[in-house]
Image (cartoon, coloured by chain):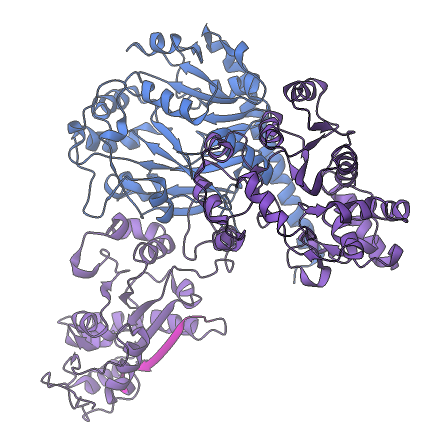
Chain colours: A purple, B blue
Amino acid sequence: MTVGFVMLCHTALDRAAQVARHWAVRDCPVVIHVDRRVGAKPYGQLVADLADLPNVRFSGRHACEWGTWGIVAASQEAATVMLRDFPQVRHVYLASGSCLPLRPVEELRAYLDERPKTDFIESVTTEDVGWTIGGLDFERFTLRFPFSWRKQKWWFDTYVKLQRMVGFRRKIPAELVPHLGSQWWCLTRQTLSAILEHPERGKIDRYFQKVWIPDESYFQTLVRQVSSTVESRSLTLSKFDFQGKPHIFYDDHLQLLRRSDCFVARKIWPDAVKLYAAFLSDDRSRQAAAEPNPGKIDRLFAKAVERRTKGRPGLYMQSRFPNENFENGRTAGPYSVFCGFADVFENFEIWLSKASGTRVHGHLFAPDRVHFAGGETVYNGALCDSAKVRDYNPKSFLTSLIWNTRGERQCFQFGPADTQELNWFLTLDGNAQISVISGGWAVPLFHSNQNFGDIRREAARLQKIEQEFLNVLRSPYTKARVRVWSLADFIENPMEPLQTIIDEIGPRQGRRLSEAPRMADLTGFGQFLQNLRNQGMQPVLMGDFPVGDDPTPKSTRRGRPYLVK
Amino acid sequence: MKGPVQTLLALLSAAGRAYGLRIRRRRHLWRSFRSRHALRGEIDRSGTIQSGDILCFMTVRNEVLRLPHFLSHHRKLGVDHFLIVDNDSDDGTADYLAAQPDVSLWHTKASYKLSRFGIDWVTWLQMRYGHGHWCLTLDADELLIYPYWETRNLPALTSWLNDQGLAALGTMMLDLYPDGALSQAQIAPGDDPLSVLRWFDPGNYVVQVQERMGNLWIQGGPRARLFFTDEPRRAPTLNKIPLVRWDRRFAYVNSTHSMLPPRMNAVYATDGGEQISGLLLHTKFLPEIISKSAEEKARRQHFANSALYDGYYDTVIADPVLRCPTSERLTGWRRLESLGLMSRGGWI
C-alpha cells in the first residue's frame, strides 16, 4: 500500500517537476494537473521532463482562478485518474506545485500505514472558524457568487449586498452540513471514491459551482457524510497572513520548517535553492518520528500578523506613520512629567533619580537648550541638545527619546517657561504620568533678584501659560495620569503625594521613602504674593497663602530624615 | 457638522489639487521627454532586457571609487540591468561602466541642476525602458538593503510586494560615517565602503507628512545633528522611494523623495500597523567628500538655493568627526530593524 500525490501546478513548473520526480522514484504515483492558463510550451517541457517516469500521469486541464470552481474540478479529475490507474494507492495526498516534502516519504508512508482508515482533512463548521476573510462565513453557502473577488471586486460586493437586501438564500442540497478547512487534504481511497461516486454528485457539483471558495469547502463538507474517521487537520504546513494570502517560505526558514515536523509545506519560493536541496536530498539525518506539530511555530506567525496590523507602539518611521488616535500608544513606554517640583525642592532631580531609580532629566523643553540628565549634549539615539532642532518637531523629539530609551523609564521637568507645543500630545498619551504643583514657578521668581515690575510681568505671563496647560489637562479626553496640587496644598503634606508618584513609577515596589527632598525657603512668600496683588496681578494658581502666616514645612527644613514607618 | 456647501467646496478644492498635481506630473514628463536630446548613447545593451527583469537607473559623476562595490552589491541582490547616465565624469567612470556586461550607458554634458538633479534624464530612460518593470533608482553612494536581504533576493521581494498589492518600497537614507575624522577613512577603488563607514545615528529622525502629495518628510542623522542645528528645516531629506513597479506615466518629483501620481507616496501604514520598508546605506562620507565639497561649492549644482549651503560645505571641508558617544555600530539588518530604522511589515 502506498500514498499517491495529486499536484495542482500553475507556476515554477521546473520545481514542480523536481518534487514530482522525488515522489515518483520513491514509488509514490503522481497525477499532475496544470492550470489551463499555462502556455503550451512550458507545459510541453514539463511533460517531457517527466516522460521517463511510468507512475506519473497528467490529468485534463481546468482554469484555476483563485476562489473558483476550477480548482475543485481539477482535483476531482486528477483524483479520479489516480484511483483508476494506481490500484495500490490507499491514501491520496492533495498538494500543489509549490509544495515541498519536509520529511522522507517512508515516514509519511509509515505514518499513514498506522492509520489506514483515517482521513486527514481540516473540516470545521462555519461557527468554529476565525479565519474567514471578507466577513463571509455561512453566507458562502447561501448566496451566489458569479463574480470574481479579485478582478470584479465592485460587482462582487454589490451583488452580495443586493442578495442580502432582498433576502435571497440558496437551499443547501442533499442534507449537507457546510464545513470549511484548508484545501490541502489527504484522503483514503474509500472516502475519496465515495465522494467522487456520490449518487447526487451532479446536483452537489452544480450547487458548489456557485459557492464562494469551493476548494475550501467541497471536500471538507462531503467528507463528513462519507467518512467514519476524520482527523480534522491538514498534514500540509500552510500559513496565511492577515489578508488571507499564503506565507511563502524562503531559504532562511530551513530550521523553522524542520522544527514543524510536518510532512509537506507550502508555499515554497521557487528560488529557495537551499530548501529544495536540503529537503529533497536522501541523506537527511532522520529524526525521531515525531507527530506533525505546526503549533510549534505558530507564535512566529502570530507575531508577524501583529507587527503588520498593530505595529510597534511609539515608533514613527518611513513605513509607520499612524494617523492621530491610530497609534496604539503614542509613545513606546511610560514616562513621568514633573511640573513645579524642581522649583519647590532643591536638587529635586538628584533626589528623584535616587528614590525612583530612573533617568531624570531637567527641563527637556527649556528655551535655551535640552537639559538632558547629567548635562549630556548628545543623548541615546544621538539626539542632540539643540533647542532649535527640538522645536522644529517636538513630537518627533519626544517620541524618539522615549523610543530610544525603551525599558528605562524617563522623567523630566516641565513648566510654563518651556515650549508648550506638546501639551495636547502629552495629555492624550496614556503613557504619560503628569504631576503638577500649580504655581510652583512662583518660587524661583520669589527668590530672584529682579525688579519687582519685571517679576510681576513674568508672573502674569507664566500664570497665563500654566492656566492654559491646566485647562488642557482637565479636558474630558485626557488619557495621561494627571495629578494637580496647588502649591499651598502640596507643601502642607509633601510626602504623601511623592510616595504615590514614586509607587506608581515603582520598579522597586514596596519601598518606602526614607528621605524627603529639601524644600526651598518660603519665608515671606505670602507677603510676596500679596505684593503681586497690590501691583494689580492676581496670583491664583498657588492656592491660599495668608500674609504673615508663613508655611513652615515641618519635617524637611534641615534635610532631616523623614521616616513614615 | 459640515453643511452641503462646505462639503462641495472641500470636494472642489480636492479636485483642484488633484488636477494641479496631474498638470505637474505631465510637466515633469514633458521636460524629461525633451531632455532626451541632451543624452548621447555610449553603449546600449538594453536589447538584453527581458520581461520581468529588475532594472536599476542612475546618474553618476566621478564615482569610480564606489561603482565596483555598488554594482556588485546590487547584482547580488538580483538587478538584471543597469541604465546609467554619466554626467561628464573625468575620472574613468565612463570607461569602467562601458566595460560592464550589464550596463547601458548614456553621456551628457548638460547641467545637473537644470535637469532637476538628473531626474529628467532618468525619467526619460524609465519612460522608455522601465514600463512594467520593477525599477530601482539610486545614487552611486546608496546601497539598498531590506529585511532578509542577505537570504532573499530582489525578485523574492518584488514578487511578495506584487502579491500584497504593493507597487513601491519606502526607504530611508542612513548616513554612515567613520570612526574618526572623515579624511581617515581611506579605501581603494572597489573596496567595500562599509569596511570604513561603520557608524550611524540610531534614533534622531524627524518625521512629518507633506500634505500636498501625501509623502513623508524625514530628516535627521549626523548632518542634521551637526551641520543644520541652526536651521533644522534645511537638513537633508532622508526618505526615498527607490523601488517602484514602474509605469511610463509615473514621475519622480524631487530626487526620489516623492513621486506622482500621489498614491505612489503611500508607502507607509497610517492605521498603526507597519508596512515593509528598507534602508539606503548612504556612503557619502568617504574622504573624497572633502575635495568634492570644495568642487560642489564652486559648481553650485546640488541645491536649488546653493548659496545657503556654503556653511555646510565649509564644515565638511574642515574634516569633522561625525561620530558621537551614542552613535551605533553597523551590524546586521535585524539590529537595524529592531531599532525601528526599517520594518519587515508582514513579511516573515
- For the residue pair A458 and A112, the one nearer the viewer reads as A112
Quarter of the image that includes the N terminus of chain A: top right
Image point (48%, 42%), residue name? B276
Q: Is residue A217 visible?
A: yes
User: What percent of the width, then of the height, locates residue A373?
Assistant: 20, 61
Image point (25%, 48%), residue name? A382
User: What percent of the width, then of the height, locates residue A65?
Assistant: 73, 36
Residue A153 located left or right of residue B196 = right
- For the residue pair A468 and A94, the one nearer the viewer reads as A94
Residue that extends furthest to the bottom in the rendered view of this protein? A549
User: What percent of the width, then of the height, locates residue A365?
Assistant: 28, 60
- For the residue pair B333 and B171, the one nearer the viewer reads as B333
Number of marks present in the image shown: 0
Asked which quadrant contains residue B140, the reply is top left
Image point (35%, 46%), residue name? B205
Image point (32%, 28%), residue name? B306
Considering only vertical position in the picture, is B160 above or below A163?
A: above
Quarter of the image that includes the C terminus of chain A: bottom left
Give yes or no for residue A481 being in the magenta stretch: yes
Q: Is residue A494 visible?
A: no
Give yes or no for residue A314 being in the magenta stretch: no
Q: Which residues are magenta?
A: A478-488
- For the residue pair A497 and B314, the one nearer the viewer reads as A497
Residue A489 located left or right of residue B256 = left
User: What percent of the width, then of the height, locates residue A75?
Assistant: 75, 39
Considering only vertical position in the picture, is B128 above or below B13?
A: above
Residue A447 located left or right of residue B31 = left
